[in-house]
Amino acid sequence: MNRRKFFSTSAVSVSGIALGAHLSGFKSKEKPVMENDLMKEVMKYKKIDSHAHVYFTSDSPETQIEYADRLGIDKLVISRPMRPGSKGLPEEFIGCNDLILKSVKKYPDRFIGQPTINPTFAKESLDEIDRCIDQGMTGLKLYNHVKISDPLFYPIIEKYIDMKMIILMHMGIGKSRVIFDAREPENVSTPEDFVIAAKRYPEAMFQLAHLAGGGDWMDACKAVAPFPNVFVDVSGSNNEGDIIPYAMEYIGEDRIFFGCDNSFFQGVGHMMAATLTDSQRKKLFFDNYNNVLKKSGNHVDR
């Protein structure tokens, strides 16, 4: 598929999904995919959103459930990272995790909870992981307080190796081809930090966040390609047309997760626009992340 045709298909996919959700009108003289046909195709795939969030607002988590319903997302892996630039004190990450526990309790059939911590506070972080895992959470969501390659993370990573659970780490927005976002602190993780951690702990599982989050996704794919214990999610709102094909080429179909990072229509839209076989789309939408969940016995039944 040439570049012009690819972007044309992408535009139709995202617009058609919005139509199917009754959010906007779409008129075109050409109708390569009818609205009902597109939404039927979207809804036929079981989906685990590997990167989702809820918020400290009156309309959350109901808003996230509503989007998921419109797009046939069966499960959302939710976390509430701490504020950008915050000190990441224990009371803050405990409060974030309490929101997740409350949300999962309210919608146990839809949400999979992930705790967040700050390894600067070693004892409090390990205690908080125990508290959250004991209440049914799985995995870990980290933000930008400490690089994933920092020795402060070593005991955390070793704990997650023992539990056979994945660690989702925020990747810095902006590198090489673009300027770092001003919100990103100096110690935000880059693809090279994932490489350092993956080399030291080949038995651990790491999830590099949001290829479509505005960073240098080409650099990220190339950096982590040789490391089978690093997975990538394709979430984010910067859905350049080549992201998924490029990740397929460098990372492979078994190490890519569908995710939205709460950009729901973009997340589903570029998955449907990508040139994938039916079996590949099933892997990315559901099977790959579910296979990771199986390692700790937290998988989703079909």
Image (tube, rainbow, N blue to C red):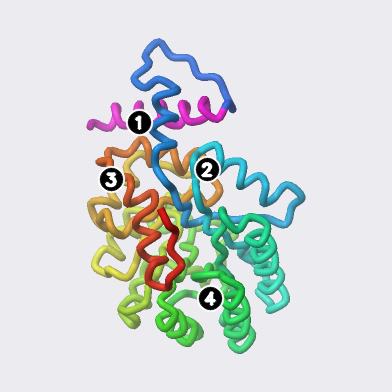
CA gap between label 4 and label 3 equals 31 Å
- In magenta stretch: residue 289: no
Tag of residue 146: 4
Residue matched to label 1: 7
Tag of residue 136: none
Q: Nearer the viewer, residue 142 or 146?
A: 142
The amino acid pointed to by label 1 is Phe
Q: State yes or no: discs 1 and 2 in contact (Cβ < 8 Å).
A: no
Q: Nearer the viewer, mark 3 or mark 2?
A: 2
Residue matched to label 2: 264
Quadrant in the picture for the N terminus: top left
- Residue at the farthest front position: 301
- Classify residue 40 as left or right of residue 51: left
Q: Nearer the viewer, residue 62 or 274?
A: 62
Q: Position of residue 293 (x, y in %)?
A: 42, 66
Residue at x 62% of width, y 41% of height: 66
